[in-house]
Image (cartoon, rainbow, N blue to C red):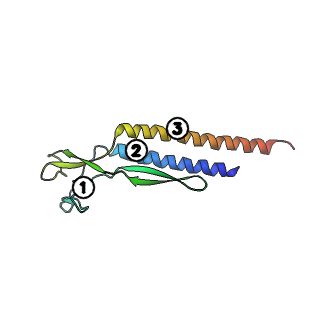
Amino acid sequence: MAASIGIALSGLTAQTRRLDASASNVANVRSTGAVPVTGGTTDGLAEGKRAPYQPLAVAQTDANPGTRATFTPITPAYLQEYAPDDSAANGDGMVAAPNVDLAAERVNQMAASRAYGANVAVVRTQDEMLTSLLDSKV
């Protein structure tokens, strides 16, 4: 009986991480950075240019019992935008903008909210069943 609470709590933690990643992506949707050059370095970082934001997703895997959620980077991490006035712009006026789809993030947030609610219902039901069992007269 107690295993169901542990499974539900792992689900609650996973959905919290999922919402954290989505909120971070939405908060940084308009941030820009220097366009990375081949080799993984960032063009002009030594000159004080900022690195682009790395959008996050959450990967859920089975953990016996329950689930495990880990942050994973979204690839490609950025899209190039023309913004010659931006301090992070390269010689062609291009900056790296995070590859974040606001509609997909909203759907992700709604799904996380529903899954969180379902896990809360499992914990509540388990609590009611245990209370009923302990209160019953033999």
* The label number, if any, that marks residue 50 in the structure image: 1
Q: CA distance from mark 1 to mark 2?
A: 21 Å
Instruction: From the image, state whether disc 2 or disc 3 is nearer to you.
Output: 3
**SS of the residue at dot 1?**
loop
Q: Residue 97 placed where, x, y %?
A: 26, 47
Discs 2, 3 touching: Cβ within 8 Å: no
Q: Quadrant of the C terminus?
A: top right
Q: Is residue 46 left or right of residue 64?
A: left
Q: Alpha-carbon distance for marks 2 and 3? A: 16 Å
Q: Position of residue 125 (x, y in %)?
A: 67, 40
User: Which percent across, then down, holds residue 82?
Assistant: 17, 44
Q: Which mark is residue 23?
A: 2
The image quarter containing residue 81 is top left
Q: What amino acid type should be assigned to the residue bearing mark 1?
A: Arg
Name the residue at 19% across, 58% down. Answer: 43
Q: Label 2 crowding class (10 Å Cα cut-off): few <14, some 14-19, many 20+?
A: some
Q: From what the image shows, is residue 45 above or below residue 56?
A: below
Front one among 61 and 28: 61
Q: Nearer the viewer, residue 108 or 127?
A: 108
Marks 2 and 3, the one that precedes in the sequence: 2
- Location of residue 112 with respect to 52 vertically, above or below: above
Residue type, label 2:
Ala
| Residue depicted at x 12% and y 50% | 92
Residue placed at 46% from the left, 37% from the top? 110
Residues tagged 1 and 3 counted as in contact (Cβ below 8 A): no
Q: What's under tag 3, amino acid-wise?
A: Arg
Q: Residues within 10 Å of mark 1 (few under 14, many from 20)?
A: some
Q: Which residue is mark 3?
A: 114
Relative to 55, residue 48 above or below: below
- Secondary structure state at the residue bearing disc 2: helix
For label 3, the crowd category at 10 Å Cα-Cα, with few meaning under 14, some 14 to 19 and many 20 or more, is: few
Q: Seen in the image, is 108 located left or right of residue 86?
A: right
